[in-house]
Image (cartoon, rainbow, N blue to C red):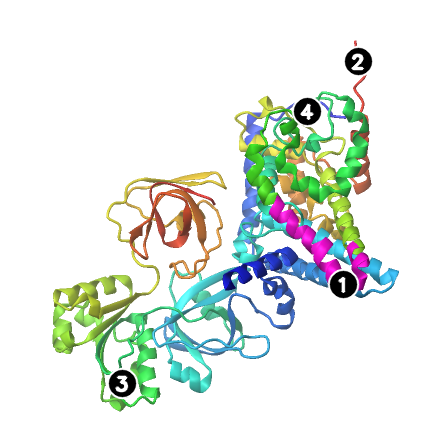
Amino acid sequence: MDTKMQKTKPSAEQLLYLEQSFNAIRDEVISDLGERDAKHIHKIIRIQRSCEVSGRLLIMFGFNPIPWALGAVLLGLSKILETMEIGHNVMHGQYDWMNDPNINSKTYDWDTACPGESWKETHNHEHHTYTNILGKDRDYGYDLLRLTHKEKWHPANIFQVIYYGLLSVFFQWGVALHELNFGGILKGEVSLKEKIPFLKQFGRKSARQIFKDYIFFPLIAGPFFLQVLLGNIVANLIRNLWTSTIIFCGHFPEEVETFSIEECENETKGHWYYRQMLGSANFHGSTLLHTLSGNLSFQVEHHLFPDLPAHRYAEISPKVQAIAKELGIPYHTGSFFKQYSGVLKRILVHSLPEPKTA
Amino acid sequence: MNALAQQGWIWFSQALTQHSSFSGYFQPLIQLIAPQWSTDAYRAQVIEIRDELADMFTLVLKPKTGLIDQQWPSFKAGQFIELMVEKEGSRTLRCFSISSSPAHYKKTGLIELSIRIQRQGRITPWIREQMRVGSLVNISVAQGDFILPTPLVEKYLFIAGGSGITPFRSMLQQQLLSEETEQRDIHLLYYSRNNQHIAFQQELEQLQNNCPNITVTFINGEQEGFICEQHVQNYCPDYHQRTSFICGPSPMIQQARKVLSDLKVDNSKINFEFFGAAPIEMKSTGQAIVHFQASEKIVVSEENKTETLLEQAEAQGLTPVSGCRIGVCHQCICKKKSGIVFNTRTQQYSDTGSEEIQLCISVAQGDVVLDL
């Protein structure tokens, strides 16, 4: 359930102080960027490539269920790393300063059905600018789920836990088709015609992905066609379920707030920072968990500083928390299980209309 | 058919690896056994670092050969290469003339880069400090058309200013080492700031003694000043029979070109190579508005202050991929959505429509919209 907006919204002076403090944190990291960050992303890329190559080999030549399963898990792991810590972060421009054409937001395209270009528009631009503004941030519920009482209930919401399950299973396709704005087309707000360039882009990218995982690698396995096909399906499934879970934990745990378009008119950078803090949620865990989530376990820090290398979020988190505490701004965090059960609860609760109060 | 097959191959590679080449995908793994290995550059090892002057040093490089490394194709005397180094995690690229000769490379497998340390520079002082014997660097193929034409017997006038001596050292050394029987007649006018700043002085004096066709005139700028008609007439009276090659700092090149023109030397017989970016020679520099569309930034450039689009983007905190910064490497290519830009290298104005431009040599004219 949505908590009411904080009773005392920070004053203009406090928001200005927030803006200056967060800008200072950002400047400090920017001036310190260097070899350490380059080494980090190079290391993750090497681990990911090793996982992918060995995973594919094991799936193909495993010849018995245990190595096959290990191969599928390795390939799934590779896809998780590639989507989260590499693709998502590189495409945010976190490593553009390295001046490396292979690790650059302009050129990088990730191993998912979603075209990189489309992602940069819908995610980097729309979602990160209008985070949790109802009616503007289509990431909020993905036009599919009702997650706040501020949105009107519809009988179709009764089954939304099932939609959520399906979205998780086919998450890369959901993300890929996000730009289509199917909801908008149904409502007649958007014409299919203006989406033709996107559909072409989507067609090209998804054809490549299907060719790779479901045609080429199974075919070259010859007699082992089915085992490779199945292995690739499992690997993609692992990645889809995991990334969907992480993404949902970022903005939909119980305490996370939403905003109206009016609240955010003529917004200052300070208010933008404030909104990002209220609209995002972290979860804590081990370094491994953070890496596998692309450090989106520091969703708050990510939303404050989307283009700082994500492995830095853990380091700046204490500073962000200290400033939040000073100004009395909530900092949403909790264990992975607390956050995720909050998400599930929210999906269930809002699948039914609120009881009418007199 | 070939182009189609190539396109198909790129599609195949992208489908399987999200990279336009398979080696791009495997590069991080290959680097585990071959550090610095790169799909878009050759590897070379630093063999020696030799100080030439207080502010100039020579890097002796050996391009690697072997199973993993493709053979570095040779070069022509006068050409330059891009040197790529990684400073604090960031790839940086600079162009340097090769100061040794192809004949020397053939014999020893070594090339030399003689680099002037730019006092305020970000990269050249760092290279001098960080490079060690054994360090690995990346280099490109040799490029550039500041080379001597092939009909052999001809007379040349070389005009060098400061570190602009490097391509000439390569050409002179080539003449000395190559076994060609017919020798070119070369006269070198070598300008230096003062008598403390003459790189390769001994070597050039020796060369002059050994080769009757080579004349070297050292000109001390402190005493004799900038290049002028009297210098050319006095030191090289048969200048009008010679084809000229000029290399050095841009003001010196401008001046030398003017002097030769005034002496009625035909333009077709004047060749020159700028060290660094070509100077911006624009007729008018009115106010221009540059819109960096993807990053939602707008810059209004000041009148009479000409900055390249790359400089303007970087001043806004944007980090487009960039390379040589003098229009050679094409790494900073960016889509211009609309507007006119002036290309400082070709001295041409662009069309108004959408096209790919090189940011480092483009200056906005009026309003320009970039996909950046």
What residue does disc 4 label?
Answer: A6
| Parent chain of label 3 | B
Describe residue B59's horizontal placement relative to residue B35 as left or right.
left
Q: Which residues are magenta?
A: A203-229
**Is residue B82 shown above or below B213?**
above
Task: Give the residue type that dot 2 points to.
Answer: Lys
Question: Same subunit under labels 2 and 4?
Answer: yes
Task: Give the residue type that dot 1 points to.
Answer: Ala
Is residue A38 found inside the magenta-colored segment of the image?
no
Q: Quadrant of residue A263?
A: top right
What residue does disc 2 label?
Answer: A356
Q: Nearer the viewer, mark 4 or mark 1?
A: 1
Within-10-Å neighbours for mark 3: few <14, some 14–19, many 20+? some
Is residue A222 found inside the magenta-colored segment of the image?
yes
Mark earlier in primary sequence (4, 1): 4
Q: Nearer the viewer, mark 1 or mark 3?
A: 1
- Could you tell me which residue is drawn at 51 percent across and 68 percent down? B41
Describe residue A119's horizontal placement relative to residue B288 as left or right.
right
Labelled pair 2, 4 in contact (Cβ < 8 Å): no
Labelled pair 3, 4 in contact (Cβ < 8 Å): no
Q: Nearer the viewer, mark 2 or mark 4?
A: 2
**Is residue A355 shown above or below B300?**
above
In the drawing, what numbered circle is on residue B205?
3
Labelled pair 1, 3 in contact (Cβ < 8 Å): no
- Could you tell me which residue is drawn at 81 percent across and 31 percent down? A345
State the image coordinates of residue B273 (x, y, percent, origin top left). Answer: 30, 66
**Is residue B57 shown above or below B306?**
below
What residue does disc 1 label?
Answer: A221
| Parent chain of label 4 | A
| Parent chain of label 1 | A
Describe residue A173's horizontal placement relative to residue B12 as left or right.
right
